[in-house]
Image (cartoon, helix red, strand yellow):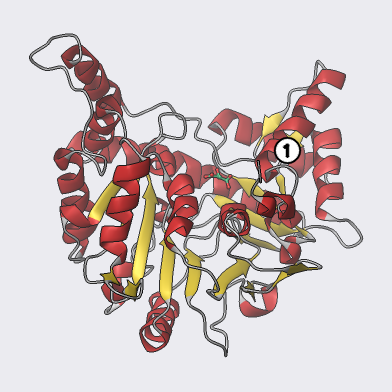
Amino acid sequence: MIVNSHFGNVKETYLFSEIAKRVSDFKAQNSGADVIRLGIGDATQPLPEVCIKAMHEAVEEMAYPETFRGYGPEQGYDFLRQAISEYDYKARGCDIEADEIFVSDGAKSDTANFTDLFGKGNIIGISNPVYPVYLDSNIMAGHSGAENQGSYENIVFLDCLPENGLKPAIPDKHLDIVYLCSPNNPTGVTLSHEDLKAWVDYALEHKTLILFDAAYEAFVTDPSIPRSIYEIPGAKKVAVEFRSFSKTAGFTGTRCGYTVVPKSLEIAVSNGNKPLHLHSMWLRRQTTKFNGVSYIVQKGAAAIYSEAGRHQIKKAIDIYLSNAKAIRKAFEEKGYQVWGGDNSPYIWLKVPEGKTSWEFFDYLLNTYHIVGTPGSGFGTRGEGFFRLTGFGSPQKTKEAVNRILKGLL
Ligand code: MLT
C-alpha cells in the first residue's frame, strides 16, 4: 500500500494530545498534586437544563416505533437549521437561509474537512500563531506544498505580533484562501468591523475565499465587535463561516456545530467542463462522507434558542468570561503583558524574558500545578507566549489565580 506521505510532514503529535500526555506523566509522578487545567478550552459547566430536558425527551421518542428516528438529513434537521437562521443570523440582520446551514459534529471537523474542496496549488493565508487544525489539515491533504524549515511553498503566514496588535495584516500578494478567526484562538484578540471590512474588500477584489471561524462569537459582549462575517456587506459572496455549540453551550463532549456556505458565494470554480459551486460541493461532500449529527443531540442544540435556553447559556458564558477576566488581571498585576480575556475566553501572555513557551509550561506545572498551553504549539510566532483559558470551574480558577498572585516570576 502507498500511504499518504504528507502525514510525514505534520508534527508527530497533535498539540493538545501532547499536553495531555505531559500532564498525565506529571500526575503519575506527583500523585498528591492538585493540578488545575487551564490548557485546552474544554467546557466545565454542565449542559444547560433546557438541553438535558430536550435530549431526555428525544431519547424517549426513540423508544417507540411511531416516533423512532433512523438516518436523519446529513445537513441537519430543519428544526435546528431554522432556529440557527432565525436567531443567529436574521435576528442580527444577516440574511442567511436555513438551507445555507450545514449542521455537523463541530467546527474542528468542518474546518479540517473543508480542505476536501480545495484543488492543488492554492496560495493559503494562515495566521501565525494559529489554531493548529488549519495548518495541519492542509499539510495532511498535501495543499501546503514543499516544506523548508517551517515555511511552506503554498502557505503565506500572516504574523500576529504585539507590533500589529496580534491581528493578521492583509498581505501585498494574492491569496486564494485565507483563514480568519475572531475572537481569536489562541490570542483572544477580536477583529473589528473595519478589520473585517478590509478583508472582505480584499477578498472581493482578489476572489479570495475567506474561511471565518466564529467558534467563540458568543463571548463577544462589546456590541461594536462583529459576531459574524456576514455583518460585513459583500461577505456572502466570499466567506464561509464555522460555528460551534461546544463553547457556546457546553457541547465539547456532546458534539454539535455548523457551517454556513452561502449559495451566493462567488468563489465558483470549474472542473473544466462544468461550473462547481462551494455550496453544492459541500452538500455533495457531506452527503457522501457524513451521516449527520444524532437527532438527540440536535434536539438538545435547538433547545438553546428558547428563551430559557438563551438565558442559561449566557449564565455559563458569563462564568467563563469572569474567569478569564480574573486570570488576565492576576497576570497584569504580576507585570505580564497580556491580551484577550475580554470578549474572549482566552488569555495570551508574553512569557518572561529568557524562557521558551515550553519552559514556562513546565515552570507553571511544576511550581504551581497549573496547566496552560505553550504559544509555540500554535506556530513559530507563538514562541515566547503562553495561552490560558477561562473554561475552568470558578473554584479552580480562583485557586489558580491565588497561586499566581502569591508566587510567580
Ligand atoms: C482549544 O483549546 O484550542 C480548543 O479547545 C480546541 C478545539 O476547539 O478543538
Q: Residue furthest front?
A: 1
> Disc 1 residue type?
Ile
Residue 399 visible in the picture = yes
Q: Residue furthest left?
A: 66
- Residue 383, percent from left and from top: 78, 61
Q: Nearer the viewer, residue 107 or 355?
A: 107
Q: Which residue is mark 1?
A: 19
Taking the image as shown, residue 217 lies to the left or right of residue 281, namely right
Residue 333 visible in the picture = no
Whether residue 319 is situated above or below residue 96 in the rendered picture: above
Q: Residue at x 17, y 52 (%)?
A: 98
Query: In the figure, residue 152 lies in which quadrant?
Result: bottom right
Q: How many marks?
A: 1
Query: In the figure, residue 220 lies in which quadrant?
Result: bottom left
- Residue 14, percent from left and from top: 67, 43
Whether residue 18 is situated above or below residue 379 in the rendered picture: above
- Residue 385, percent from left and from top: 74, 59
Image quadrant holding the N terminus, namely top right
Label 1 crowd bin: few (<14), some (14–19), many (20+), radius 10 Å: many
Q: Nearer the viewer, residue 82 or 124?
A: 124
Q: Residue at x 16, y 17 (%)?
A: 68
Q: Quadrant of ligand 1?
A: top right
Q: Is the residue marked 1 within 8 Å of ligand 1, measured from its CB?
A: no
Q: Nearer the viewer, residue 385 or 405?
A: 385
Q: Nearer the viewer, residue 77 or 378?
A: 77
Q: Residue at x 57, y 90 (%)?
A: 172
